Image (cartoon, rainbow, N blue to C red):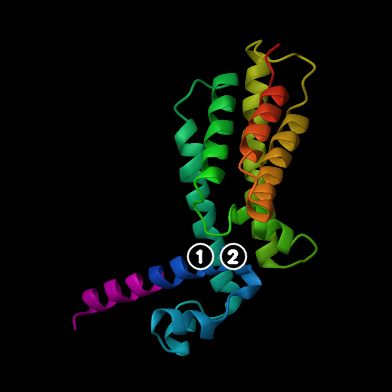
Amino acid sequence: MSPRRSAADAAQTREAIVERAVAVASTEGLEGLTVGRLAGDLGLSKSGVIGHFGSKERLQLAALETAVRVFREEVWERAVAAEPGLARLRALCEAWLSYLGRGIFPGGCFLTAASCEFDDREGPVSEAIRDALALWLGAIEREVATAIKRGELAAAADPAQVAFELNALAMGANQALQLQGDREALTRARRGMARAIGAA
């Protein structure tokens, strides 16, 4: 086997491991990831799994990185073409709710689940989760600030408060969907989001 083909096979195997890890972690948590479980699911040896990452923590970080990329593609990239400010905020909210409603991950919003799982922990994984959420909230705050400058939102509007409320509504909708099977949760969240970003 040529070195090029060997590298391609290794990359393909690693991608399959991460994809399965994301699916498992979505329903069982990042701590629910075990080398033995993934090896069994994928028909690999334990060394064949861990050899791609070196540790469970790095496997968790790889799964988280993939989940964040999917979130960005499903939410931010679907809305970024909208006019900056209020129009983009509305597009972001709609894409966010669509992401939740379509069940992109088996266990609902990966970041919501991970943030609840690691909210009282320290270490690289919790730091990565905090960084991802801070980046997302910062993006919302910038759009709110833009909407204020454009006169689309009241001058007294607080970007951090609006971002907090939108995130709380999305997390609440995710919980209602996953825990209670409440399909009306998205409608309620949409109404709350509309109030949170109500035009001046």
Crowding at dot 1, Cα within 10 Å, few <14 / some 14-19 / many 20+, comes out as: some
- The CA span between labels 2 and 1 is 7 Å
Q: Position of residue 115 (x, y in %)?
A: 70, 57
Seen in the picture, residue 88 relative to 33 is either above or below; the reply is: above
The quarter of the image holding the N terminus is bottom left
Label 2: few (<14), some (14–19) or many (≥20) C-alpha neighbours in 10 Å:
some
Image point (57%, 62%), residue name: 26
Q: Amino acid at mark 1?
A: Ala
First to last magenta residue range: 1-14
| Residue labelled with disc 2 | 27
Contact, mark 2 vs mark 1 (Cβ under 8 Å): yes
Q: Is residue 59 magenta?
A: no
Q: Which residue is mark 1?
A: 23
As helix, strand or loop, the secondary structure at mark 2 comes to helix
Question: Is 92 on the left or on the right of 41, as rendered?
Answer: right
129 versus 167 height, above or below: below
Task: Describe residue 51's horizontal placement relative to residue 64 as left or right.
Answer: left
* Residue under the image location 66 percent in, 58 percent down: 113
* Amino acid bearing label 2: Thr
Residue 87 seen in the current view: yes
Most foreground residue, 63 or 20: 20
Q: Residue visible at 47% across and 43% down?
A: 74
Q: Indicate the position of residue 137 as horizontal and vertical percent values.
A: 67, 39
